[in-house]
Amino acid sequence: MRQLPQTLSAKLSPLRAFACVCALLAATLLCNAEQTQNLGGIWKFSADKTLNQSDAWTQPGYDTANWANMAVPGSWDTENEYAHFKGTAFYVTQFTTPADWKHGFVRLHFGAVYQTAQVWLNGEYLGEHVGGYTPFEFDVDKVLRAGESNTLAVSVDNTYNRGAWWKWGGIHQEVELVRGGQVQVERQLIIAEPNLENGTSQIDVRVILRNLGDTPFRGELLSRIVSWKNQKPQGPLAQKPISLEAGATKTVELTFQLNQGETTLWDLGNPYLYELLTRVQQGQTTVSEKSDRFGIRKISTADAKLLLNGKPIHLSGFNRVATHRAYGQTDPEHLVKFDIDAMMAMGARFSRIAHHAQTPELLDYCDEVGYLLIEEIPVWSKTDPQVWPNNEQTKTWLREMIDRDYNHPSIIGWSVGNELAEQKHKGQQMSWRVYEYVRTMIEHVGTLDPTRLKTYVSNTATGANGPGIDPNDVVDIMMHNSYGGAPGQVEKLHKIWPDKPIFVSELGKSQVGNHLDEGKLHEQLKEEISALKKYDYVVGCAIWSYNDYRSHFDGTPSTENRAWGVYNVWRQPKTAAYEMRELFTGEASDAPLPTMAPIPNYRPVDAVYILAAVPLPNAIMVGYSVVDENDDYEIAYQKDGGSTHTLEVRGLKGAAKISDLEPGKYSLKIRPLKDDAEWSAAYEVKVTSEDSLSSQVSHN
């Protein structure tokens, strides 16, 4: 969230500047409506299953001195000791808030925890959240001890497993305390569509307010649209008196009309962004503020075509598995920016990007660079236990995802599942139960967001012999997965549903392979990518996959690496990435593609070597090749030419972490733990110290 100033400033806040100029707000306006305290850092961690026998570990004063340290946000699977831990783990941290917080209303916010989280504050049980990719929060002002030490305890269970990606356990996104006023702006739902005939636009907004107090509230709501980059006001200031009874939630509806000069479309070539600034005030006191970015654009389908701002688009891209061996499932900002940039460097612009809700950082960046997305909930395959009509759990996942991500112009659609089929039947076959799951979820999505495309991803529809057999009946755009024979499959789909566009949401043929030089695309895959371009009703395709990924899926080797990617897990391009760039752009080029970690010059096929070394705060994640899956390893590391230390790596394949390092330049080598094994060539990396881990208070 953009940090807003505490004091009235025309230079820093267009909403406040405009209000001041119009004499609508007094110069003495108080603007400390909301404060946040980041609780991230190093927490105490234990995987001792006996702790589940009571809640003693959640109580203030419980001795955690012998527990491990664990980063939050973080995935415990990135630590050597817990690389294969599956079950319930336990987190505890202490913090102190400012003393004046006892006079406010405080929420405890979690960005995402995989998969099931139970939360206690000062020994009081707050509740449970199920689902590893969406946010949740609790009201805690009655439990919080302002100005004193507080104990936050969280149990995290990662046993639930969906899909072929690794079930990384941990608290993966931010944990924050948010202190606000009696009435808070929970969210803003913005519908911004242009009039393509006259160049104007209408912005319809629903502002959801909640009164957290035990007394009625009377005040005023002010909203203002500005251009995001230059903060120039666009259109009029909206003002409405508001009234909320104690404990009530209320939706305030606003409409803005922007003229032709104020309307700039969000498009692929110019992903122009606006910002909606909203304030609740009572007299001269600001009670709550919220800002949200949005873009003015129109997504539609017609005559089996996908239209952006009234123009047909044909775009392709990649599926991205949102993990990294060094970062787990935290998806830090620098990683998502690198990945989107690398995909776009290969010509990608559109993806059903993964099987679950994405991090806000990725969505923000796609908004900024103009990359189109369809977002999906993690319901996958014929064995998924969630596939039954009107499932309240999947409705909750859809609501949490859509509520959080509603205003992102890069998101053009929502998917309710992937490769669903009847588990009682052989192969991939549809059933009435699965059909009704898709139908009822798509109906639910329509109640949450009537403006975007609704879909699910099928690999059963080609088995239909007419409408009424597959849920493609109820989707706005057909999403089809193919691992061979895509041209013939899309032809059959078009015959059954001739009015609907098709996007080949997963296209693959075989794994690319681990070696950077030998990792090439299958010839049939290249032929099918080219062949799909001739079908006007095919929007494009997304390759499975952009990156290699850690997995425990059936058939995965002991290296735990599925080598489908055109980039490896360390974000180094394979030969296949250069082939993809030529296929997507139509142009051959020798220009190097971006790489996140330096690629070693010597890359033997038949010997172990260090492929990448990722510097972390006071640590290094070392990636290495695997020749014999039965090998264990020894890593030697030397700081600034000093003495050599070694780390034995047993039971870990392809990645190991060296911790507790001092800042400096390190030289690394590796060899198998065998008699007379030779050391690899050296790989050098610079390690820096940890960032400050103390909780900090900032003002929004």
Image (cartoon, helix red, strand yellow):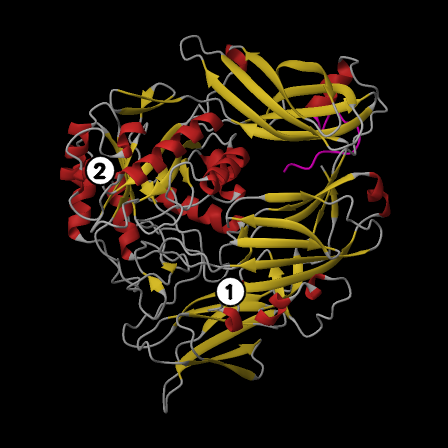
Quarter location, residue 214: top right
Looking at this view, is 610 or 106 the one in front? 106
Residue holding disc 2: 461
Q: In the rendered image, which residue does mark 1 sit on?
A: 87
Identify whether 586 is placed above or below 217. below
Give the percent coordinates (x, y) of residue 687.
Answer: 58, 66
Identify which residue is drawn at 56% across, 79% down: 641
Q: Amino acid at mark 1?
A: Gly
The foreground one among 585 and 450 is 450
Residue 244: mark in rendering: none
Q: Helix or strand or loop: what does disc 2 sit on?
A: helix
Secondary structure character of the magenta stretch overall? loop
Q: Residue at x 69, y 65 (%)?
A: 57
- Viewer-proximal residue, 295 or 157? 157
Determine the secondary structure under disc 1.
loop
Q: Which residues are magenta?
A: 1-13
Residue at position x 60%, y 59% in the image: 155
Task: Determine whether 204 is above or below 290 in the image.
Answer: above
Does residue 5 belong to the magenta stretch?
A: yes
Around disc 1, counting alpha carbons within 10 Å, would you say few (fewer than 14), some (14 to 19), or many (20 or more)? some
Say which quarter of the image contains residue 136.
top right
Q: Is residue 174 visible?
A: no
Q: Is residue 66 left or right of residue 162?
A: right
- Magenta-span inclusion, residue 420: no
Q: CA distance from mark 1 to mark 2?
A: 37 Å
Placement of 236 over or under 312, stated as above or below = above
Residue type beneath disc 2: Ala
Q: Residue at x 27, y 32 (%)?
A: 472
Q: Nearer the viewer, residue 374 or 9?
A: 374
